[in-house]
Amino acid sequence: MALIVQKYGGTSVGDTDRMKNVARRCIAAQKAGNDVVVVVSAMSGETNRLLKLVAQITDRPSEREQDVVVATGEQVSIGLVAMAIQAQGGLATSFLGHQVQIVTDSIFSKARIKRIDADKIVEALKQKHIVVVAGFQGQDEQGNVTTLGRGGSDTTAVALAAALKADACEIYTDVDGVYTTDPNVCPAARKLDRISYEEMLDLASVGAKVLQIRSVEFAMKYKVPLWVKSSFTDDPGTLVCEEDKSMENVVVSGIAYDKNEAKLAISGVPDVPGVAAKIFGALDAQNIVVDLIVQTASKDGKTDLSFTVGKTDLVKAKEVVERVTKDINAGGVETDGDVAKVSIVGVGMRNHSGVAAKMFQILASEGINIQLISTSEIKVSCLIQSKYTELAVRALHTAFGLDKAPAAS
Ligand code: ADP
Ligand code: ASP
Ligand code: MG
């Protein structure tokens, strides 16, 4: 008998008919001879609705209380899905994060899972129950409710699959697999049958929201066979797995974009040792993750420093940076939320030169200005004005030969 963890995202539990569909699929998986654990997200739009309520109260919410609010969306889903399974004649029990004992650190809104004590799940599975677990949430050592960051239900599912030594983890969503880029932005996107953990990790890290980055980290570390499938079709989907030789032949295997970053630019930064350490140390102390960084050449002992942070951290980051710029005697701080990061990813880049230059040429030929750049062994990212995102993604997709063959007429 196999143990399968299935995860259904917001669209897949978007209304009660869709929840009944999820219940049917879980029961079918159990009837096929499997133990089934199902992780569900909040109904689509619900987490955003809850965050809007928070924003109506304050733009500097207590992060602890914000997590108390946003974690509620998943509670509604697990109760309804468990009932839908029962209504179809199955046995089901729902669990919240703290009931399972998904223990996290205390970084509210982006907590990391430290350990899972799955005894209750194992017990319920022995009783032949389908176990329905709330995604996205946990509790810290002090018993506070925590959440795992947007898209965090993916991570709940993979972490549970690792803890339970599941035979497979299946992520059911509103597309039928991982594509060469977001199929909702680029109609020529091609579905991949397989993708390496490493490439998926990089695609997720640069914004391909089909899987949360931490879910891929867990899958890679614990070698969880991870499938991305549609909850609306029976397509086999995409398998995220170990890299093999054939994958290296493809130079660029995917393109991603991220509109959730914002840029901060500090002018007149004294060009002396220790200044960058002060600025980024202060941001780190507030758990603000910095992504792209660029420093201009020094002129009259001063430089300009630009970098990006997550949009949700912008208000906090600006406050921190304004404080530090006073200390170090820098000029002003400007922010720009109207930016997007477009990235190309591929393990084949290790063996090919000129890939970054080609990306810059393609963006230039579309008249798109590049504000910040970052490169790593298997990815290149460019920050551009947000309104050009779709144009950039499509142009890069075509130029790097990723477009699917046009349908025969
Ligand atoms: P869920 O609510 O099921 O977690 P998400 O909205 O978080 O679903 O993720 C699925 C979405 O990810 C798709 O609808 C698609 O727009 C987007 N996406 C971005 N990049 C990719 C990609 N490379 N392959 C497939 N989907 C992608
Ligand atoms: N409901 C959470 C979100 O919208 C978690 C998830 O769906 O994965 O981000
Ligand atoms: Mg998601």
Image (spheres, grey):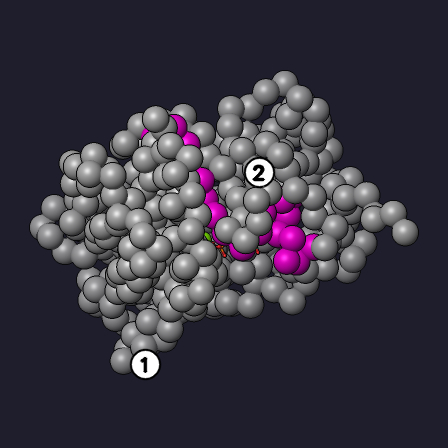
Q: Which residues are magenta?
A: 166-186
Label 1 CA crowd tier, 10 Å (few <14, some 14–19, many 20+): few
Our reading of the magenta stretch's main secondary structure is loop
Given the image, on which type of amino acid does mark 2 rest? Pro
Residue 308 - label: none
Residue at the image position 78 percent from the left and 57 percent from the top: 366
Residue at the image position 54 percent from the left and 30 percent from the top: 196
Mark 2 vs mark 1, CA separation in Å: 43 Å
Residue at the image position 38 percent from the left and 32 percent from the top: 33
- Say above or below: 3 vs 90: above
Given the image, on which type of amino acid does mark 1 rest? Gln
* Residue 363 placement (x, y as % from top left): 74, 52
Farthest residue, direction right? 409
- Say above or below: 112 vs 78: above
Between residue 408 and residue 303, name the one nearer to us. 408
Residue 121: quadrant of the picture: top left
Nearer-N-terminus badge (2/1): 1
Label 2 CA crowd tier, 10 Å (few <14, some 14–19, many 20+): few
Number of numbered discs: 2
- SS for callout 1: helix
Residue underneath mark 1:
56
336 relative to 281 in the view: left or right = right
Residue 236 - label: 2
| Placement of the N terminus among the 4 image quadrants | top left
* Residue 399 placement (x, y as % from top left): 79, 44
